[in-house]
Each structure stands twice: as structure tokens, then as C-alpha cells.
Image: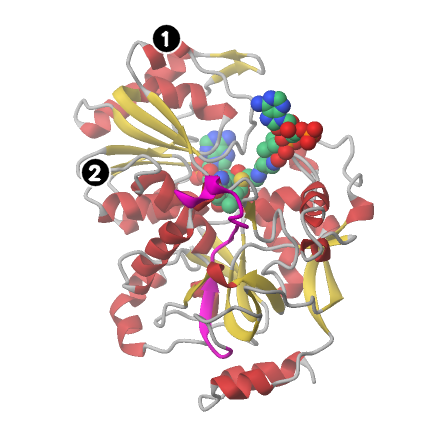
Amino acid sequence: MTVKDILDAIQSKDATSADFAAIPLPESYRAITVHKDETEMFAGLETRDKDPRKSIHLDEVPVPELGPGEALVAVMASSVNYNSVWTSIFEPVSTFAFLERYGKLSPLTKRHDLPYHIIGSDLAGVVLRTGPGVNAWQPGDEVVAHCLSVELESPDGHDDTMLDPEQRIWGFETNFGGLAEIALVKTNQLMPKPKHLTWEEAAAPGLVNSTAYRQLVSRNGAAMKQGDNVLIWGASGGLGSYATQFALAGGANPICVVSSPQKAEICRSMGAEAIIDRNAEGYKFWKDEHTQDPKEWKRFGKRIRELTGGEDIDIVFEHPGRETFGASVYVTRKGGTITTCASTSGYMHEYDNRYLWMSLKRIIGSHFANYREAYEANRLIAKGKIHPTLSKTYSLEETGQAAYDVHRNLHQGKVGVLCLAPEEGLGVRDEEMRARHIDAINRFRNV
Ligand SMILES: C/C=C/C(=O)SCCNC(=O)CCNC(=O)[C@H](O)C(C)(C)COP(=O)(O)OP(=O)(O)OC[C@H]1O[C@@H](n2cnc3c(N)ncnc32)[C@H](O)[C@@H]1OP(=O)(O)O
Ligand SMILES: NC(=O)C1=CN([C@@H]2O[C@H](COP(=O)(O)OP(=O)(O)OC[C@H]3O[C@@H](n4cnc5c(N)ncnc54)[C@H](OP(=O)(O)O)[C@@H]3O)[C@@H](O)[C@H]2O)C=CC1
């Protein structure tokens, strides 16, 4: 039995759940990995010069044992997230440290502690097998997976599963991720695949869409409301392209920051009007490595006021981190919110605290999303209210190049990876709905 047989079953319209359950599992499958014995390969290099094409491998790996509450999924497509860039350059820490720690949790999690890390935190595919205790999902179900892995053995995670002390990001802090032909997930990661999307489109939003939903919309994040001025950094990037859509769909006013006219045009095509090209306007928030320039914060704030008719920012959607955080705190209005989920340009932030406390601003830390939030975010995709922002699709063999493009900010929106899907364009089950949304679905392609 090979993965080809699995693929044939997926493409056969008549295959039933029993047919899927009857397919013998292959012994091995192809997966994107990084190797533990290579964690020092970029020692001494600047972050920018660490090249994912050198550390990312395509290996044949054994199918992992299936545990209680888990599923093996035939992965049709996945996507590249920035966390896979971090893994592939071994920053800020080697993710093998996470696998080692998870491996110590229980005899079952020991499976994850291997000399290779199968990465990837998104998938669209078909359930092949479910483990003991799984009732909600069956072999043959067409699914997407969110990337929250929790144990929930402590009381702490039961108000909000992101607060579980054993909360992990699948495919980053656990093994057997989505950039592979088969993935191992907990079944409480599964959600229905939006029927109007191809495999690669359905695999694109998961991680970033869920994160943006919690960070901006959820009461656990900024709880955005109608009319809010929302400053969105990287507004045509992975997170930002969903934050922009949430702002527009929720009646808010996105102020989109991008770095080229092409990216500005993408934001315009989504419906945004207030757009700042940070390159063209030449903001330099740091005079040198150690000194910020408040005059530049002010110039940036003045520009925002021009675009909003004199108003300041209610919510900053932050993720660039060190480079922008001082400006983000400055331009927020009295009582406003800076919500942050990342630090791409550096995690030691500096800001002038007088502008925070005197103006009663709040900084909210946000990280991924709980199952409910991820489900809500996926539901909005399934209803055609929010659209995937897929710009380009790579083959599994080209994943290193895809990660390189994301690392070097050469991409737009999301980049997809075909895993088992033999070509782009497959997997659509609702052509009528697709036709209604086709322009929005294709907006990010070939720009
Ligand atoms: C969905 C997608 C998301 C993304 O893309 S996010 C971007 C990618 N992710 C990242 O860049 C984050 C990567 N992760 C990390 O860098 C690290 O993961 C953290 C910095 C988040 C945490 O580091 P750690 O080493 O796990 O935690 P510690 O707290 O520095 O060290 C653990 C030890 O410190 C003790 N400790 C914790 N809190 C306290 C305290 N308040 N007072 C005293 N000690 C404390 C613990 O108990 C433990 O101790 P003991 O080593 O002995 O077990
Ligand atoms: N905690 C969590 O749950 C999550 C965290 N993340 C983290 O968020 C970060 C962004 O992820 P994602 O959106 O997918 O990445 P992308 O690279 O797709 O998009 C980020 C965008 O941010 C902008 N940007 C990058 N660097 C700077 C800078 N120095 N100053 C201003 N703008 C900048 C760029 O847009 P432009 O050049 O057009 O301005 C870029 O396109 C990553 O660090 C990632 O690990 C992501 C998802 C979840």
C-alpha cells in the first residue's frame, strides 16, 4: 500500500468512511523536516542570512503510532507559516528543545522526541484513521486542522484552552506537522473543510486567520467594535491580510501599513482606503541600534490623523515588534489598545511608558486561539465572509524555497504547499458558492 492508493480513494467521489478505514496505512510517508544534528549550522550568521533552503529537508519517515483522541490525516495541502521559518533557522530557540520537553510528559508523547522535526502548522486533507475515544470524526471526513495542542489535565485551561500549562503549537512545539503527506493531530484540532475552496486555499488561512481573530475580534483580544480605527502592520502579509478583512467586515476602519505600491494595491482591492507605504514615506523609528526617534513616531501619527480625519488609533495590531513597538504605543489614542502576538524584528521592545500610563493605554499579549475561536474564524471562511489570501503554491519539494521567500518578505498573503494533491485546483465541493466568491478568492494570486 502506498500513499498513491490513499490519493485514489480521496479523489473517488464514491469512497465511503468504511472504504477509508479499510485502506491499509503505508509504513512511511514523505515529510518536510529539520534535523537535530544541524541545529548549529547557522551559528554566527545574522538572522537575515540564515537560509531555510539549507536546513529544510524532504525525508521518508515512518508513520507514527496513533494514540487516544488522535487522528492520522492524509494531507492534501499545507501552508508556510512564519513559525516554520523560525524552526528552520533555529531561532529564537531550537524547536528540538520543545520536542524534548514534550517527550518527557508521558509515554505517549515520547513519540514526538525524535532526531527530526516534521514541521508545519496548517493542513487541509482527509481523515484516514481515528484513535480510541474519538466519536466526532470519521475516516473520510474532509477537514482542516487548527494548530492548538492541549492536554487539559490542569484546571487552568478550562476557561480558555490557550491557558493550559501544556499548551503547544502543533508542528512547532510538537512533531508530525502538516508539511507532509500524512499528519498526526488531536481530533479537537479538526474543523470542517470549507466546501467552496480547493485544498491549497483551504489550508492557507488556519493559523493566521485564527490568530488574527483572537487578537483583534475576540474578547480575549482587542474586542474590536464598529468604527474603531485599527492600525494593521504588514496589512497584506499572513496575519495582516486577515486582520484587514476582519476590520472591514466588522465595520471598523483599517489603517493598513505596507512596504510597496503593489502591496498597497492589494489592500485597496480588499476594500481598505487608508494605506501607508512605510517604504515610500521613509519612516525610521530608530536613529541607531539603541536610540529611537520620537519625531518619527510623531510624523507617523500625523499621517494617520490625515488619513482618519484627525482621529487616533483605537487598536494597534502589532507583530513586527522591536522596530515598530515604540511608534505603536505612541500613536494609540487615550484608552486604546496595543495587541501583540509576535516580534519578527526583535523581542526586546522599547517604548516610552509615559505615553502608556498617562493615556491609560493597554498592551494585550495574544497567542494563537482556542478551539472555539479557531472554529469561529474557520466558520467565517466557510460562509464566504472572510477569504483565503493565497498568492502562490509550491510543491512539497520546493518548501525550502517557499520558507526562504517568507523569511525574506518576498511573498504576499499566504503561500501554499501541495502535499498529496497532485495539482492545484482540486477539492472544491460547492462550485456554486465558489463562483459567487471567485474574485475575492483570487485577489492575492499572481500579484
Ligand atoms: C501560532 C504561531 C505562533 C508563532 O509563530 S509565535 C512565534 C514563534 N515563537 C517564538 O518565537 C517563541 C519561542 N519560544 C521561546 O522563545 C521560549 O519558549 C519562551 C521564551 C517563550 C519561554 O522560554 P522557557 O525557557 O520555556 O521558559 P523560562 O520561563 O525562561 O524557563 C523555564 C524555567 O523558568 C522557570 N520559571 C518560569 N517562570 C518563572 C518565574 N516567574 N519565576 C521563577 N522561575 C520561573 C520555570 O519553572 C522553568 O524552570 P526549570 O527550567 O527549572 O524547569
Ligand atoms: N503568536 C501567534 O499566535 C502568532 C505569531 N505569528 C508571528 O507573527 C509574525 C508575522 O507573521 P505573518 O504575518 O504570518 O508573517 P508575514 O511575513 O506573512 O507578514 C508579516 C508582515 O509584516 C511586515 N513587517 C515585517 N517586518 C517588519 C518591520 N520590521 N516593520 C514593519 N513591518 C514589518 C511585512 O509587511 P510589509 O513589508 O508590507 O510592511 C510582512 O509582510 C511572525 O513573527 C510570526 O511568527 C504569526 C502567527 C501566529
- Residue 359 position within the rendered picture, expressed as x and y whole percent measured from the top left: 28, 13
Q: Secondary structure at mark 1?
A: helix
Determine whether, in the image, residue 151 is placed left or right of residue 307: right
Q: Is residue 270 magenta?
A: no
User: Observer-nearest residue: 376 or 268?
Assistant: 376
**Separation (CA) of disc 2 from disc 1:** 26 Å
User: Observer-nearest residue: 4 or 394?
Assistant: 4
Q: Residue at x 65, y 59 (%)?
A: 176
Residue 115 — which label? none
Residue 225 — which label? 2
Q: Callout 1, which amino acid?
A: Arg
User: Observer-nearest residue: 396 or 442?
Assistant: 396
Query: On the image, which quarter does residue 197 sit in?
Result: bottom left
- Residue 410 position within the rendered picture, expressed as x and y whole percent measured from the top left: 53, 46
**Ligand 1 location (quadrant):** top right
Which residue is situated farthest in the right direction here?
37
Q: Give the residues drawn in magenta, as a range.
A: 139-160
Q: Callout 2, which amino acid?
A: Lys
Quadrant in which the N terminus appears: bottom right
Query: On the image, which quarter does residue 316 sit in?
Result: top left
Q: Residue at x 44, y 55 (%)?
A: 206
Which numbered disc, 2 or 1, marks the residue that appears first in the sequence? Answer: 2
Query: Disc 1 designates what residue?
Result: 354
